[in-house]
Amino acid sequence: MLDRKGGTKMKKHLSGIAMGLTLALGAGSGAMAADEPLKIGFAPPVYDTLDYFGQFAVAFQEEMERQGVDIEFTARASTAEANVQQQLDIVDDLITLDMDYIIVGPIDYFGIVPALQAANEAGIPIIVVNHLDVHPEDAGVDVLAYSGYSHAEGGEVTAKWALENVLSEGDKVGLMFAEPGNQISEQRVGTARDLWVAAGIEVAFEHYAYWEQARAFDATERLVLANPDVKAIYAGNSSMAMGVANALKGMGEDSIDVFGFGAVPPELDMIWEGLIRGSIFRDSQSSGRYIADAIVRHSNGEQIERQYPLDMVMVSSREDVLTKVPEGSLRLMENWPEIEGELQSGN
């Protein structure tokens, strides 16, 4: 076992305790000359067909099939998005299963280092997704490739957009973080907080909801009643933002703007319906295709890029949903029939 201690409430299409999924995919001929399928292990923090990592996996497998590459795809996720130790154990299991490649979406960017080191020792190439920054040299890990974006930049985009469109000096905001010390949460929400404070915005409250929709939902009413003049609440992922928005809806409160990060299809539905003011969209399907192609090339002895960046855009209106979000994500929204009609009419 690796030595390190450390869910969203969307519709769970794929879930479970240390959830495991193994699929054999591909055609009989293709770029790979191997007689056996390429064994791919995937260790995301959560795994749902509607979330960032679920959409990554779908696109990854589709691209492998499109290229005619046989793969055996094993995905395992921890039971809670904040459970670092369980993710370390999952990577340890994937190493034991002798994967050809392991893809990790770290719960904790530095907390995952022991798992990356173990994969290095086993000679298994590691790919990190949902992060673009290369681990520093003193971390002692060799990562084949990264695909993602800057979480801090996403927080900056959110903060500046809110200052231009929603917030003014003297306004108050509430903040929803993951667990204390989580680097991703601090980069997303902490960066926005610092910019807002510098602009004269007051932080009414900070709360740790551990990335979870239920925790954010349960805390929102109490926090808002204690801070009735709060103008906006920024939650550091889609699940927490949806929890906040649903709680405000239940309270009949429509004067507080909610910001999220991720713009997964259920969150896009809430933007479409006016329940969430805005969220950062990242195209995880493109990331899946990039990494599939990179693995094919690497397995054929070709040089590949070290970093595969993703664009980030603020989605804050129905027009943004129609013009900034790829159709593949739109089709997963509950509002797709209406959206399809809008797209067909050209509106």
Image (spheres, helix red, strand yellow):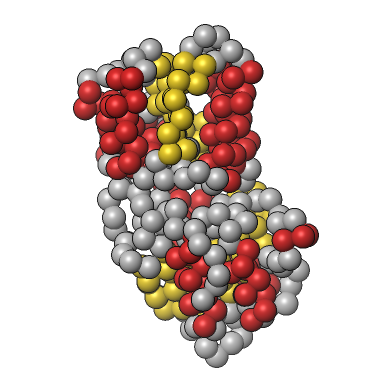
Residue 292 % position (x, y): 57, 65
Percent x, y of residue 24: 42, 78
Q: Classify 282 as above or below 299.
A: above
Q: Nearer the viewer, residue 90 or 41?
A: 90
Q: Residue at x 40, y 17 (%)?
A: 230
Outermost residue, bottom direction?
35
Q: Residue at x 56, y 39 (%)?
A: 186
Viewer-proximal residue among 127 and 251: 251
Q: Is residue 263 visible?
A: no
Residue 125, above or below 341: below
Q: Is residue 58 above or below residue 214?
A: below
| Quadrant position of residue 229 | top left
Residue 122, by quadrant, is bottom right
Quadrant where the C terminus is found in the figure: top left
The residue located at (63%, 43%) in the rendering is 150
* Coordinates of residue 198 in the picture (x, y in percent): 64, 18
- Please indicate whether residue 125 sits to the left or right of residue 264 in the image: right
Q: Nearer the viewer, residue 209 or 134?
A: 209
Q: Nearer the viewer, residue 220 or 321?
A: 220
**Any part of residue 18 in sight:** yes
The residue shown at (63%, 63%) is: 113
Q: Report whether 41 appears left or right of 310.
A: left
Question: Is 244 drawn above or below residue 303 in the view shown?
Answer: above
